[in-house]
Image: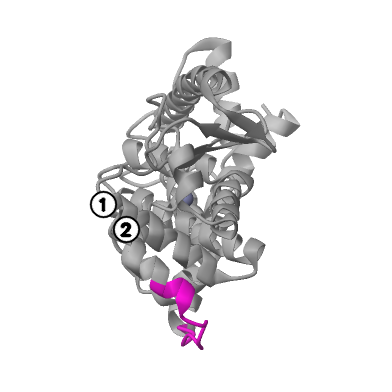
Amino acid sequence: MTPAVLLAATTVVLLTIGGIFGHRALSRLTPLFNRFPRLALTAWFAATGVWAALFLALGPVFAWFGSRQILPGAAGEVCQRCLAAANPFGQASGPVANTLPAVIFIVIPALIVVALALRGLRTTMQSQRTLRRHGRTLDMVSTLQAQRVWVLPDAQLGAYSIPLGRGRVVLTQGTVDALSKSELTAVIAHERAHLRQQHHALLAWVRLLSQAFGWVPLLRAAAPVVGGYTELAADDAAARTVSNPVTVARALAKLQVLAHDGLNHARDLAGSAATAVPALHAAQTEVPSRVRRLLQPAGATAMPRCLLTAVGSYLLAAVAVVLTITSPYVSVVIMGAC
Ligand SMILES: [Zn+2]
């Protein structure tokens, strides 16, 4: 087996293992991730990003086996020189080599990257338009605006953050009236943690990959799981701010009880729910587990060393493979070797 074949086979194997079994491995780390939600966010971000990079590297690695005879004349010669310079293993040979033009394997992932970038750009622009419109509504109807917190004259429960400008936290008067001062501080800290830790951007990234590669179990599972861990990370930040996790738990419990009494929570008053992150998710089913987590002292969590080693090794191997494949192409572009 030649080095080029070995690298191509490794890429396919890593892609298959990560795509099919990655979410199961990460799910088995839930006890550890519940204790360290920011570690969970890092792991899920890395796993989804590495999988997408491996997928896009498939084309460049298979290009080493394709034919360099693409175009006649000078343009074809330049193209051949580029492809030759980007292949550290030399021209492949054998029955599968030269059956398809190598350039196809470069063009397809390039088109996927462009499509993903355009989709991300369009979503971001639509989101920013909605946020700016929402921001103008907030400026007009809020009864109080201080320290990047906007209060709306609405008796229903509502609290969320929006990544507009330096970030805004929005509360309804109903929430302000329902909570004590320390609980309100916790809610605001929770929302600010969403903004500071870039949870909106992280969720947008994961959703983009989920939509593009929804047929891959790892990426299909990512968006809801990552959304849950952003809440835990924001809960922890709120607990640190008020120096008391019980206050955060009490705020969560109060909002849930009031929501069950018939009040809505986290309602986006300007109709931009797609871009708003609800505060504390007080009426949702995971609230009891979040309250329990805040109230229970952090006991010793068994360190799943084998699983952590396996996940870490997978990520390192995948990054090494992606770099091995893409670095010759990058150097060709940078050095102008063709
Ligand atoms: Zn939240």
Residue found 35% across the figure and 69% down from its top: 289
Q: Is residue 324 left or right of residue 301?
A: right
Q: Is residue 327 left or right of residue 106?
A: right
Residue 293 within the magenta-colored segment of the rendering? yes
Where on the picture, by quarter, is residue 236? bottom right
Q: How is the image coloured?
A: one colour
Q: Nearer the viewer, residue 203 or 4?
A: 203
Q: Is residue 330 left or right of residue 122?
A: right
- Residue highlighted by disc 2: 257
**Which element type, helix, strand or loop, lies under badge 2?**
helix
| In the depicted structure, whether residue 221 falls above or below residue 162 | below
Q: As shown in the figure, which amino acid type bears the numbered disc 2?
A: Val
Question: Can residue 294 be seen at all in this image of the molecule?
Answer: yes
Q: Position of residue 65 (x, y in %)?
A: 42, 41
- Residue highlighted by disc 1: 261
Q: Which residues are magenta?
A: 292-304
Q: Which mark is residue 51?
A: none
Q: Marks 2/1: CA distance? A: 6 Å
Q: For the C terminus, give its image quadrant.
A: top right
Q: Residue furthest right?
A: 335
